Amino acid sequence: MIQALFVLFAALAVGAAINVVVQKHVLYSALSLIVLLVAMSGLFILLEADFLAVINIIVYAGAIMVLFVFVIMLLNLPEDEDGTDRLRWLKFVGIPMGLFLLFMVLATLWQTGADNAATTQMPGTPQAIGQALFTDYLLPFEVTSLLILIALMGAVVFAKREL
Amino acid sequence: MIPLNWFLILSAVLFLIGVLGFFIKRNIIALLLSVEIMLNAVNLTFVAFSSRIHQISGQIFVFFVLVVAAAEAAVGLALIIAMFRNRETLNVDRSNLLKW
């Protein structure tokens, strides 16, 4: 049953990721990425990381992707122009090499021991995450707020008229 | 119980799709979306290991990755708007002023 759910979410994730890459218009790519995020949240729930699953939907699909879709619609883009000359040979070189890399990684990962560990002792509840975040990881958490502040100022500066 | 390497293989496949998209797409927003795919693949690895070795740290790192992704999207999209305003295109091959 759990394996069937994993296969379902994994197929959804891989299909959505492929759709992001092959889609010609960026808006469809962005919408497909939202499907990928939902599948990713399902996988997080299978791994008993409940809080991250919810946060993934709220922050990623709800905030970041809305920003993307907003900018795409604001700019009123033309169709994707992928067919330029340098791409012709790049595809013939790049895709076989990418598949080769994929094969090597899969061969290595397949050999790693399939450990069947017991049930999780520490599920990712908000309590467990909050306790770790505000004790052991307090300094990185505070630095994060500084990062957000700098990103905010940078966005304002870049979006100004005279750049 | 799902074996750990199923998650690792799924994560590797997603990461490689992201890398492939980063190399074959020319629209700069599509490049940012490919980067998001790669970040999600890495998140999946973090959570899988965190759940398997019973350490909460992996999930905390996913939290930080989310924050960095949000900051990256904000700054990146502001840059994209500035680029579109100056050049009227989003094709990365067209912005070749610093290329030889």
Image (cartoon, coloured by chain):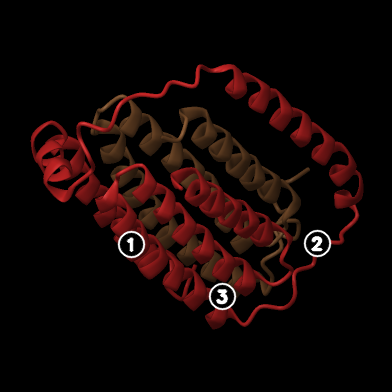
Q: What subunit carries mark 2?
A: A
Tell me the crowding category of disc 3: few under 14, some 14 to 19, or many 20 or more residues within 10 angstroms, Cα based.
Answer: some
Check disc 3 and give the amino acid type: Ile
User: At which x and y percent is residue B85?
Assistant: 58, 75
Measured Cα–Cα span from mark 3 to mark 1: 19 Å
Check disc 2 and give the amino acid type: Asp
In this rendering, the label closer to the viewer, 1 or 2: 1
* Left or right: A67 as drawn, with respect to A30: left
Q: Which chain is brown?
A: B
N-terminal-most mark, 3 or 1: 1
Measured Cα–Cα span from mark 1 to mark 2: 31 Å
Check disc 1 and give the amino acid type: Val
Circle 1 SS class: helix
Provide the residue designation for mark 2.
A82
Can residue A30 be seen at all in this image of the molecule? yes
User: At which x and y percent is residue A10?
Assistant: 55, 49
Rendered residue at 38%/46% (across/down): A46
Measured Cα–Cα span from mark 3 to mark 2: 17 Å
Pointers 1 and 2 in contact (C-beta within 8 Å):
no
